Image (cartoon, rainbow, N blue to C red):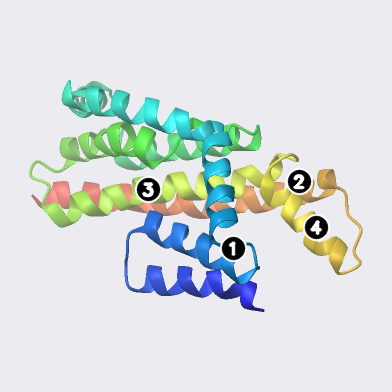
Amino acid sequence: MLVLSGLLVVVLGFAFRLNPLLVVTCAGIVTGLAGGLGIFRTLTTLGHAFTESRYVAIVWLVLPVIGLLERAGLKERARDVVMRMQGATTGRVLLAYLALRQITAALGLVSLGGHPQMVRPLIAPMAEGAAERDVADLDEPTRQHIRAHAAAVDNIGVFFGEDIFIAIGSILLIKGVLEQAGVRVLPTELALWAVPTAIAAFVVHGTRLLLLDRRMKSRGSDA
């Protein structure tokens, strides 16, 4: 049970709102020490996993590119494009991204979107630009509310879409847990039963986005 002490570190770290990278690193060290690996072998294992992960290099390449694009006015251009599109509203923009995120996640392309590389520089400014056409003067709470919806769309789309792809980690985890309980199930069967859940999630959150549109339009008419 001492090996699970790393989970306690994660819970306490997130509860006190500490740096997530620091919390996860400390949890890994605590888990390694509790498992009897020793400090040097634990650090070696962490370093090996860090250098062997192909996504580490991708992060360091993508983030500077996103920073340069934002400095060059990427968010402003995205907002201007949406404001010139007839019929584009906040809810419709987010609904289109929700559909795209779910479909691509169902095909295994979970890294195609994301908060830092897609939501912050593109989706959130586009949703705000559509809202500015209905509401002349958006206050800060409303902007934060729209940004929260943009982040939620990405989370919901990938969360309920990725389970349709049979080679995703969540499907393999579910399969392993069920097999430990004596339930034999194929990954294709799990993916098949994930389809109704994904459709239900799309309908429920799509309704929320359409209601967001109604609130934006009512505020615009009141103004």
Relative to 194, residue 55 above or below: above
- Secondary element at image label 3: helix
Give the residue type that dot 3 points to. Answer: Ala
Q: Is residue 192 above or below residue 70?
A: below
Q: State which quarter of the image contains the N terminus.
A: bottom right
Q: Nearer the viewer, mark 4 or mark 3?
A: 4
Q: Give the Cα distance between marks 2 and 4.
A: 14 Å
| Disc 3: CA contacts within 10 A as few (<14), some (14-19) or many (>=20) | many
Q: Earlier in the sequence, mark 1 or mark 4?
A: 1
- Asked if one can make out residue 187 in the rendered structure from this viewpoint, the answer is yes
Indicate the position of residue 82 as horizontal and vertical percent values.
26, 26
Residue 22 percent location from the top left of the image: 38, 58
Q: Mark 2 belongs to which amino acid? A: Ala
Q: Which mark is residue 176?
A: 4
Q: Quadrant of residue 103?
A: top right
The residue that mark 3 highlights is 151
* Residue situated in front as seen by the camera: 38 or 213: 38
Asked whether disc 2 touches disc 1, contact meaning CB atoms under 8 Å apart, the reply is no
Front disc: 1 or 4: 1
SS at circle 2: helix
- Kind of residue at badge 1: Gly
Q: How many marks?
A: 4
Alpha carbon separation for disc pair 2 and 1: 40 Å
Q: Are marks 1 and 4 in contact (CB under 8 Å)?
A: no
Horizontal side of residue 124 vs 44, given as left or right: left
- The nearer-to-camera label among 2 and 4 is 4
Tell whether 92 sits left or right of 170: left
Report which residue position mark 2 lands on: 191
Q: Tag 3 or tag 4, which sits nearer the N-term?
A: 3
Disc 1 target residue: 38
